[in-house]
Structures are given as C-alpha cells and as structure tokens.
Amino acid sequence: MKPLVLKMGGRLLQDRQALDALLAVCANIKQQRPVILVHGGGDQVDQWLSKFGFVTEKIDGQRVSPAEQMPVITGALDGAVNAEMVSRAMLQGLLPVGLNLSAGNACQFTVNTRLGAVGIVKPADATLIELLLTQGYTPVFSSIGIAADGQLLNVNADLAAAAICQLVKGQLVLLTDVPGILDANMQLINELSAEQASNLVLEGVIKGGMKVKLDAALETAAALQSNIVVAGWQNPADLMNLMQDKPVGTCILY
C-alpha cells in the first residue's frame, strides 16, 4: 500500500498528550501500511532564536533564515524537535529513525536567496527510505536540508513533506492547527479544486502559511494524480477515518 506521509507542526509539537495520541494512531496504521513523519517546529525555532538574541522575520508565510541563524535553527529542528519526535514515537511502539532531508540523498535543493539559507526542495533518491520502510522502520524527517556545497538549509515543512510524498508516491496528509482550509466566513471547505483555490488566494482568503500549505498540496496532487488532505490534528480518530476513506478536513482535488 502507499506509504502515509504525515506532516506535523504547529502547536501539536508542544502538546505532548495530543502528539502521543496521534502517534498511537500512526502505530495502529503502520500495522497495515508504512508511515513516514515529517515535522517542522516554528514555535520552537522562534523560542530558540529569541534566546540567542535573533529577530524572526517571515515573508509570504515562510521564515527568513539568514546564514548566521542556521546553527540555531538546525539545533532546534534537527536536534531537539527531531529527538523529541523520535522519543515519543518509540513510546507508542513505532521504530522511528530520525533523519534530515538530505539523508541518503533523499532530496536535493536550490537556495531561495530571497529568504536567506532556505532550500527549495525537490525529490531525488528514495533508496534509503524504501530500505527503512521494508525493514519496518518509520522515518522521522526534520525540515533541514543540505545544499550541494554543504550549506545548511531551512526548508518549509509542508513543502518538505510534499517532496517526500512525491518521492515515495505516497498519500499526503498535512496537519494544521485548524480543521482544514477555511472560507471567508471561517467555515471549513470540504473540497477544493485548483481553480477554486486560485480564486480564494486572489481574494486574500488564503494567505501566509496556509497558502504555502495549499501550494504544497496542489503540487503533490498534480504530480501524483491523487487527492491531498489538509486537516486538523485535534482529533486523532480523524486519521483513522481518513484511512477508511471517510471525509476529513479539506480534500484538495487533483
């Protein structure tokens, strides 16, 4: 079966009870199909940068990552947050392996110099991931990559998850702090086509971080010719419902 590629981030990573409940569902799903986890950790990065006296800046929902901030950003994402994810996954019976996006040449990058040391991610080599999945392991990817010249790169976690999903031809679920993509009246949109999405962006309804998430979903849906789901993390049972083809969150139509 297609691997489930699950992107986690936001407040979920700071809510241990909710994270544990979601990882328990992942352990249940893994009995039937492989699971790959991809995480961000923007709140944690903000906290670390503040402690080191750095100021956080974002453009169009993406973090500006000057090279001098990358040791701190990498320490937060590829160090503390990834280790925490691995430890919580172990406690739920998974066999997690912590990785960054360059492990095994899984992804390759160009640099978005407008945002500093930020990687534009593309899928590259699935060999390591497929080996891990075959042996029953659960890859846990941080959103840190490495450029061809060795430069550490920060990567938007939604775009990272999209690239990993395209690499393994999986099923992508982007988890968020709200139930899904909302309309101008803050009501959940159950299904969204590319044309409808474009109109909502032009109207300013979808913007910032949600637009980045939408872009990742649309690109993956087109690449894999399959629907992508953007959903909230607050109810772990929704993930099981999704595996049973029940409607959850916002379905991005290809």
Image (spheres, helix red, strand yellow):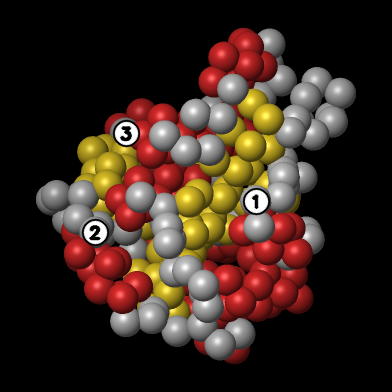
- For badge 3, the amino acid type reads Asn
Kindly tell me whether residue 219 is visible in this rendering.
Answer: no
Disc 1 marks which residue?
Answer: 245
Residue positioned 86% across, 23% down in the render: 185
Q: Is residue 45 left or right of residue 99?
A: right
User: Where's residue 160, x and y in %?
Assistant: 41, 49
- Marker disc for residue 112: 3
- Marker disc for residue 226: none
For numbered disc 1, what is the local secondary structure? Answer: loop
Looking at the image, how many numbered discs can be counted on the residues?
3
Q: Pointer 2 and pointer 1: residues touching (CB < 8 Å)?
A: no
User: Where's residue 151, x and y in %?
Assistant: 22, 52
- For badge 1, the amino acid type reads Asp
Specify few, some or many for label 3: CA neighbours under 10 Å numbering under 14, 14-19, or 20 or more. some
Residue positioned 28% across, 42% down in the render: 122
For numbered disc 2, what is the local secondary structure? Answer: loop
